């Protein structure tokens, strides 16, 4: 039996006919969208992820304009007349034991904490990307050698490795960033190696090899862009962890040194005045919590957007 194409009923509105035509076209557009656009659409449909992104963007913006709101001299100069003042219109976050404005120090401390987190992730991601790409792509004895090196590093707790590096180099925020970044390299190496092992079996890699592409071109032009998703998720979540670890080491006196404002160092200073000036530890602590929570919301949103199968 021959099948005839259904026709619109007589007198049907133009809108209904247009809807029939537009439906398949819209479906084609949805299907034809790139994976990046589909992931972005899923991300921005997640209210928690969007909220985290908005808070994170606001924190970055405020820390960027901190020098226009408070000069460096304002946050380090001692003022005996304004010691331990409670929150007020003049000092919304109060003042510390040296009379310095807490709001200005929290904003400047955000610059230090975020910069430390970014550099920690950059060090770990840079070293892990190189080692993971080479290990996963080369295989054989090269893979075994790199993985045994990674196993040795993973056998040492990350915080202990960081403390060892800081102990050897001395206290300071730069030393902490280097120590924590180096401690993160094994985790990034394992993640990227696993993604590369999966990606290098795809047809486009075999096609590039048949066409005579060099190993370097295959790794950086064909494999790396296709494993960027899990790397981006892990790096985002790692940023929050890096901020907490650097703040923790500064709290122990191993990171930022006075008079430099840093959230962990401010917590350490405020601990001594908890009973008499609750605002000294509370506001830096809230800043850490809000920053890390917003970053984790963004990371979880990216994970769900890039790999929706992980959603429960």
Image: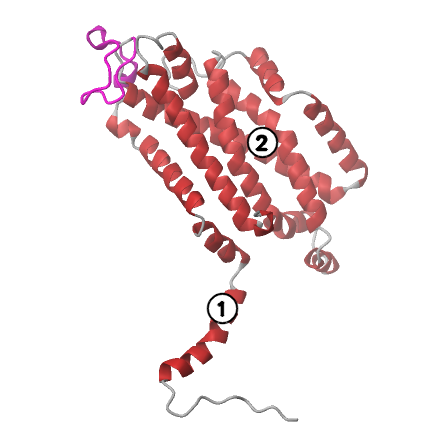
Q: Is residue 218 left or right of residue 57?
A: right
Q: In this view, does 118 lie to the left or right of 282?
A: right
For the point 53% across and 60% down, the residue is 34
Picture colour scheme: secondary structure
Q: Is mark 2 on a helix, strand or loop?
A: helix
Crowd around label 2: few <14 · some 14–19 · many ≥20 (10 Å): many
Residue 245 magenta-drawn?
no
Q: Which of marks 1 and 2 is in front?
A: 1
Foreground residue among 45 and 67: 45
For the point 52% across and 50% down, the residue is 305
Foreground residue among 176 and 14: 14
Q: Name the residue under label 1.
A: 29
Q: How far apart are marks 1 and 2 (CA)?
A: 39 Å
Q: Can residue 160 be seen in the rendering of this structure?
A: yes
* Above or below: residue 75 compared with residue 288: above
Q: Name the residue under label 2.
A: 124
Q: Where is residue 108 in the image (x, y as percent from the top left)?
A: 34, 24
Which residues are drawn in magenta?
73-97
- Looking at marks 1 and 2 on the same chain, the residue that comes earlier in the sequence is marked by 1
């Amino acid at each position: 039996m021959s099948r005839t194409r259904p026709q619109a009923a007589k007198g049907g509105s133009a809108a209904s006919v247009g809807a029939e035509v537009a439906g398949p076209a819209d479906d084609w557009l949805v299907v034809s969208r790139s994976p990046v656009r589909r992931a972005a659409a899923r991300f921005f449909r997640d209210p928690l992820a969007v909220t985290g992104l908005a808070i994170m963007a606001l924190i970055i913006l405020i820390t960027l304009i901190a020098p226009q709101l408070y000069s460096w001299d304002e946050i380090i100069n001692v003022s005996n007349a304004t010691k331990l003042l409670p929150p007020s219109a003049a000092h919304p976050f109060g003042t510390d034991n040296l009379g310095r404005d807490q709001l200005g120090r929290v904003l400047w401390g955000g610059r230090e904490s975020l910069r430390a987190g970014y550099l920690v992730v950059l060090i770990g991601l840079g070293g892990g990307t190189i080692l993971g790409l080479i290990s996963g792509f080369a295989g054989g004895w090269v893979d075994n050698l790199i993985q045994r090196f990674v196993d040795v590093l993973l056998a040492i707790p990350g915080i202990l490795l960081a403390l060892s590096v800081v102990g050897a180099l001395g206290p300071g925020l730069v030393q902490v960033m280097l120590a924590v970044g180096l401690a993160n390299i094994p985790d990034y190496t394992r993640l990227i190696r696993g993604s590369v092992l999966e990606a290098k079996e795809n047809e486009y890699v075999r096609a590039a090899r048949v066409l005579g592409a060099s190993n370097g071109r295959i790794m950086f032009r064909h494999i790396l862009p296709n494993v960027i998703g899990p790397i981006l998720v892990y790096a985002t979540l790692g940023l929050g962890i890096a901020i907490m670890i650097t703040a923790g080491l500064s709290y122990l006196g191993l990171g930022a040194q006075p008079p430099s404002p840093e959230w962990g160092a401010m917590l350490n200073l405020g601990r001594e005045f908890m009973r008499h000036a609750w605002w000294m530890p509370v506001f830096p602590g809230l800043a850490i919590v809000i920053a890390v929570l917003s970053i984790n919301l963004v990371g979880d949103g990216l994970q769900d957007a890039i790999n929706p199968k992980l959603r429960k």
